[in-house]
């Protein structure tokens, strides 16, 4: 039996601003299996990104239990959480969040550079592979400002997948992209899933959400629906994504 | 209308961030205030001509024999007056002790003996009567005196009919011929002017009168250098002015102001330090404004996109600098005014003189205020232009497309880094110089004079009117007996010069050495009563102390300091050896004929080397002590060693002395502690000023670095969030940011340490270092600055690291 990737029980998140208490998440129960392609949808301010932050150990829950790969993360210190983020989780953000002073290659190499279990050769090989997977090898020496939005997001995806994490977290990955570039990015995610990656994606876009094989809907900080579709609709391939992208922009 | 709007907008922005505004105004006030204060001092002491009419044309002339300073003689005055063509007026004057008595009381004032064109040169003008003229200079003529306004008011209650009255000065009737106006008094405000009544033609060179000040007025169109060359040419062709044939006679010629103020190198060093502080302030404010303009880059971009001309944008951004600097400048003027007043109070409270020399007085007037305004305007440009110019050059398209990650951020970041590098350099240099100076001066103070001074009080007695020989000795014996009986007195003695005073020096020749004149050893000469060593707590290392048998009829004896013994007879016992001093004209030391040389004096004892006000000097002058009964100096100091507070003996001492002779008042009566305070007043002042500047520099550097790093880290908050989201450990982020600070440090130290060493070398060469303790500064200062940089970096960084990565990612 496969080990459960994520197990959340009664997760709560409360924000305090001055004297106001805001319940961003309430009583969240969530289990994610390896290989899941999960989309999280809901209206603005419903707590989607907060949930993603907690899953990605970017933030801590105010209450409840959270286990990752069978280990409770509730009581982990910053150092341990950092280590897990570095090795087990890959992030894709809506605004790409590439470091502007670093080249494409340096951005991709950044999370790998802190992995002690990999030699330099392995790190370079992984980064090269990730660049190839998103068809950005020819831009490896460019800076983010020299790339289009779609290209920047492809680099961000390469950075997220380079370390072969257990889980890829994507927060509105197509939110800042036009339709064609968005399609390219979604196909990349489909391909990653097809190759065995576990993906958890927050999105506003129903069409993107439909590509996942499981979709949860959040309203006012609570999961109101959790639907599974055996195959999802993400049928694209990486090669198709590359071809399409080349048609959009070089 | 637009201008008004810009001003309103700038004011609104300043009020919006009041703490920032207040901080920058305080920073500017400190920098501008410090520089205005020191500029005022430099202007008064160095740049301004003497307060005489045609003050910029008045020169001071001093005699030099073989490149050593000697007192100028009446013969020099006459020679220059007769032959030098580059001057049109010449005068000499010397201070003299004068005792004014009316049968009931005697008061000692500092009198001024004058000759020649003194009143024309100095501008001393009569309020009543007339000035002293050539007719008054006739030897044997009726004694006359001109009173200063202060003495006329204080002693004579401003009697309108004072002219023509006879007053008793030094036991002799003098007719008052004039009263000077209050403003024109020179060299001090409470003085008498008396005719010198001597002419070079009536005297041999050996009997010539000494002139403490010889002034001349340059003819229009002649420079100081031209006058110097002409006087030197005449001196070199005047063998009649030499006291020995192989002497080289030259003149030291400077402007009168320079001569009054003395060496200015420490003042100029202080001036340079104040400019460093001002630069640090400007850099600091510029950096803060740069950070501010960076945080408002979106607004700038919108303005540019809407078509704002660059010049307009620069002007608009500079308005904030204008207000900050003007307000800082206004406070600075008050601060400098307070500084000037406090400094005058400080020096006057430490001065033994009844009044502070006019040439040394500072004040903050209209001219200084204008200088303050000019410095402020320079500061406006220095602080405001760079941030305004940089922000006007931003790539507004990028900013509007992608607010937080912009080219402007990088540009201003690099400018900011240059500014911080400069701050570290300047503060490092200033702190090293200040630290070394502080240690050197403290070491000098700690070394002291070689005796414990805090129990002593001394007062001067001038006994010129007692004939040389027995009557002087008899008078002083009576004084000593009387003051020894005073309650609270543990012991009393008489010496010609105390360790807290400079001492006249002589050139010494050891018997049988056959030394050439230039090899003679220069030594202080102190005359003393037999119990002086015992009273002052100076132990005799070898031989014996003086006793009552060392009198006029006995063999001439001397006790010398260990340093003198080592110089005259290295590795030999000096006891029984003989030495003689060479005395030039008026007690100053030239190689002369046998008639000028003393008799051979036998060394009977050796004492430790005592400093005569040389605690900061690189080389000590050795001492020779002789018994009073064999010398009979006309001015002696009565010294009391007290059981308690010596200042309490001041009045009883004066009373006891007057009891013996009402016409011989004690003067310059001060505790040795007070004299010590005066001796080190300027060193203490410079030491504390440098310390203040160093602290200001450190604070400026700390706030500047903190401001830059805080801004830098704030701009990189999102990036730090990304790194943390990607699993970069906090330690790696700290290393990354610290690495950038370290780069600034390395650049700052790379320049600051060598500059600091060079600046401190000025002080090391100037002051004697008792040990190498000062070298610790070269290690401590970098550690302090590095610690400050570390704190200034880690504080804002930890603020970001305390956030969750999710918050950092959301940071805008």
Image: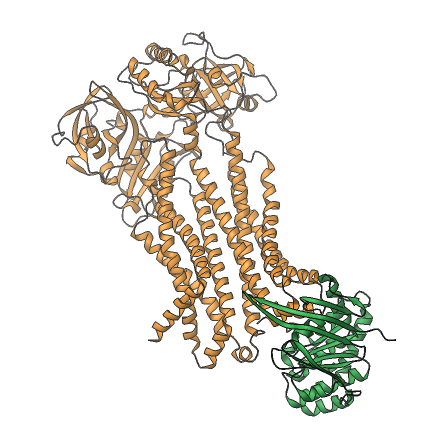
Chain colours: A green, B orange
- Number of numbered discs present? 0
Residue at 44% from the left image edge and 30% from the top image edge = B676
Q: Quadrant of residue B583?
A: top left
Q: Is residue A119 left or right of residue A142?
A: right
**Where does the N terminus of chain B fall, quadrant-wise?**
bottom left
The percent coordinates of residue A189 (x first, y second) are 74, 83
Where in the figure is residue B530, as x and y percent of width and height?
45, 12
**Left or right: where does residue B3 sit relative to residue B700?**
left
Of residue A242 and residue B575, the one placed in the foreground of this image is A242
Residue B582's place in the image compared with B401, above or below, is above
Q: Nearer the viewer, residue B483 or B11?
A: B11
> Residue sitting at 62 percent across and 56 percent down?
B746
The image position of residue B113, as x and y in percent, is 26, 29
**Observer able to see residue B462:** yes
**On the picture, is B354 further left or further right than B714?**
left
Image point (56%, 55%), residue name: B424
Position of the C terminus of chain B, as image quadrant, is: bottom right
Residue B334, image x and y in percent?
35, 51
Residue A50, located in which quarter of the rendered image?
A: bottom right
In the image, is residue B715 above or below residue B396?
above
Q: Viewer-proximal residue, B794 or B608?
A: B794
């Amino acid at each position: 039996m496969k080990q459960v990737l994520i197990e959340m029980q009664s997760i709560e998140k409360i924000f305090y601003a001055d004297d106001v208490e805001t319940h961003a998440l309430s009583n969240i129960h969530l289990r994610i299996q390896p290989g899941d392609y999960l989309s999280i949808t809901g209206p603005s301010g419903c707590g989607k990104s907060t949930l993603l932050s907690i899953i990605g150990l970017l933030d801590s829950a105010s209450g409840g239990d959270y286990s990752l790969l069978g280990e409770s993360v509730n009581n982990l210190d910053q150092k341990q959480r950092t280590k897990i983020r570095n090795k087990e989780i890959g992030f894709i953000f809506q605004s790409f969040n590439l470091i502007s002073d670093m080249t494409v290659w340096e951005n991709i190499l950044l999370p790998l550079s802190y992995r002690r279990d990999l030699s330099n050769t392995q790190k370079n090989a992984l980064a090269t592979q990730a660049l190839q997977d998103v068809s950005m090898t020819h831009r490896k020496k460019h800076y983010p400002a020299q790339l289009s939005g779609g290209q920047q997001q492809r680099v961000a995806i390469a950075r997220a997948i380079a370390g072969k994490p257990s889980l890829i977290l994507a927060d509105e990955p197509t939110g800042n992209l036009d339709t064609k570039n968005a399609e390219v990015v979604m196909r990349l995610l489909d391909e990653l899933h097809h190759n065995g990656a576990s993906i958890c994606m927050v999105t506003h876009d129903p069409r993107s959400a439909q590509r996942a094989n499981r979709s949860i809907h959040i309203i006012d900080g609570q999961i109101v629906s959790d639907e599974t579709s055996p195959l999802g609709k993400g049928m694209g391939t990486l090669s198709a994504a590359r071809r399409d992208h080349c048609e959009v922009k070089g | 209308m637009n201008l008004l709007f810009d001003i309103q907008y700038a004011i609104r922005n300043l009020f919006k961030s009041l703490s920032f505004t207040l901080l920058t105004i305080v920073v500017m006030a400190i920098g501008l205030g410090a520089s205005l204060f020191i500029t005022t001092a430099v202007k008064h002491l160095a740049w301004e001509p003497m307060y005489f009419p045609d003050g910029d044309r008045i020169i001071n002339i001093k005699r030099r024999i073989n490149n050593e300073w000697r007192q100028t003689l009446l013969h020099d005055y006459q020679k220059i007056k007769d032959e030098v063509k580059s001057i049109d007026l010449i005068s000499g004057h010397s201070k003299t002790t004068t005792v004014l008595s009316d049968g009931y009381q005697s008061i000692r004032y500092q009198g001024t003996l004058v000759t020649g064109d003194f009143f024309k040169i100095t501008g001393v003008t009569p309020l009543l009567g007339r000035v002293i003229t050539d007719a008054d200079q006739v030897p044997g003529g009726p004694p006359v005196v001109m009173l200063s306004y202060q003495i006329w008011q204080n002693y004579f209650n401003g009697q309108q009919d004072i002219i023509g009255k006879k007053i008793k000065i030094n036991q002799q009737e003098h007719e008052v011929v004039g009263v000077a106006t209050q403003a024109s008094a020179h060299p001090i405000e409470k003085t008498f002017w008396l005719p010198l009544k001597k002419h070079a033609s009536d005297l041999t060179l050996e009997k010539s009168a000494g002139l403490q000040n010889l002034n001349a007025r340059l003819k229009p169109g002649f420079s100081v250098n031209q006058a110097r060359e002409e006087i030197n040419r005449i001196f070199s062709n005047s063998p009649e002015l030499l006291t020995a044939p192989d002497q080289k006679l030259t003149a030291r010629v400077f402007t009168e102001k320079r001569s009054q103020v003395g060496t200015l190198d420490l003042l100029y060093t202080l001036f340079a330090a104040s400019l460093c502080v001002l630069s640090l302030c400007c850099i600091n404010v510029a950096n803060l404004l740069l950070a501010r303009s960076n945080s408002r880059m979106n607004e700038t971009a919108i303005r540019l996109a809407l078509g704002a001309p660059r010049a307009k944008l620069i002007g608009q951004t500079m308005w904030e600098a204008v207000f900050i600097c003007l307000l800082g400048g206004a406070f600075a003027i008050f601060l400098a005014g307070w500084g000037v007043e406090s400094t005058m109070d400080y020096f006057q409270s430490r001065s033994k003189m009844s009044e502070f020399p006019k040439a040394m007085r500072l004040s903050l007037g209209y001219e200084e205020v204008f200088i303050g305004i000019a410095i402020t305007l320079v500061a406006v440009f220095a602080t405001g232009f760079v941030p305004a110019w940089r922000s006007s050059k931003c790539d507004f398209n990028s900013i509007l497309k992608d607010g937080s990650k912009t080219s402007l951020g990088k540009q201003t970041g690099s400018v900011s880094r240059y500014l911080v590098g400069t701050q570290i350099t300047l503060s490092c240099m200033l702190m090293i110089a200040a630290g070394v100076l502080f240690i050197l001066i403290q070491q000098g103070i700690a070394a002291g004079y070689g005796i414990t001074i805090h129990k002593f009080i001394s007062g001067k007695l001038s006994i010129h009117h007692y004939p040389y020989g027995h009557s002087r000795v008899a008078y002083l014996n009576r004084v000593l007996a009387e003051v020894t009986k005073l309650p609270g007195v543990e012991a009393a003695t008489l010496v010609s010069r105390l360790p807290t005073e400079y001492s006249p020096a002589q050139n010494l020749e050891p018997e049988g050495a056959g030394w050439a004149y230039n090899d003679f050893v220069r030594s202080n000469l102190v005359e003393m009563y037999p119990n002086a060593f015992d009273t002052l707590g100076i132990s005799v290392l070898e031989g014996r102390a003086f006793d009552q048998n060392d009198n006029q009829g006995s063999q001439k004896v001397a006790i010398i300091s260990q340093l003198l013994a080592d110089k005259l007879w290295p590795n030999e016992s000096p006891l029984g050896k003989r030495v003689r001093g060479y005395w030039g004209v008026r007690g100053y030391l030239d190689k002369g004929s046998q008639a000028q040389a003393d008799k051979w004096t036998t060394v009977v004892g050796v004492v430790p080397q005592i400093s005569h006000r040389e605690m900061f000097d690189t080389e000590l002058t050795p001492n020779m002590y002789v018994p009073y009964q064999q010398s009979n100096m006309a001015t002696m100091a009565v010294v009391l060693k007290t059981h308690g507070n010596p200042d309490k003996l001041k009045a009883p001492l004066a009373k006891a002395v007057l009891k013996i002779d009402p016409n011989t008042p004690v003067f310059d009566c001060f505790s040795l502690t007070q004299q010590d305070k005066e001796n080190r007043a300027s060193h203490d002042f410079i030491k504390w000023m440098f310390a203040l500047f160093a602290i200001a520099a450190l604070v400026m550097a700390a706030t500047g670095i903190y401001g830059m790093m805080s801004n830098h880290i704030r701009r990189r908050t999102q990036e730090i969030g990304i790194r943390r989201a990607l699993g970069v450990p906090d330690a790696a982020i700290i290393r990354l940011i610290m690495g950038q600070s370290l780069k600034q440090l390395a650049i700052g130290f790379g320049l600051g340490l060598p500059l600091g060493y060079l600046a401190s070398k000025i002080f090391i060469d100037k002051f004697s270092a008792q040990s190498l303790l000062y070298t610790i500064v070269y290690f401590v200062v970098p550690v302090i600055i590095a610690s400050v940089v570390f704190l200034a970096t880690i504080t804002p960084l930890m603020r970001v690291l305390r956030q969750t990565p999710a918050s950092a990612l959301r940071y805008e």
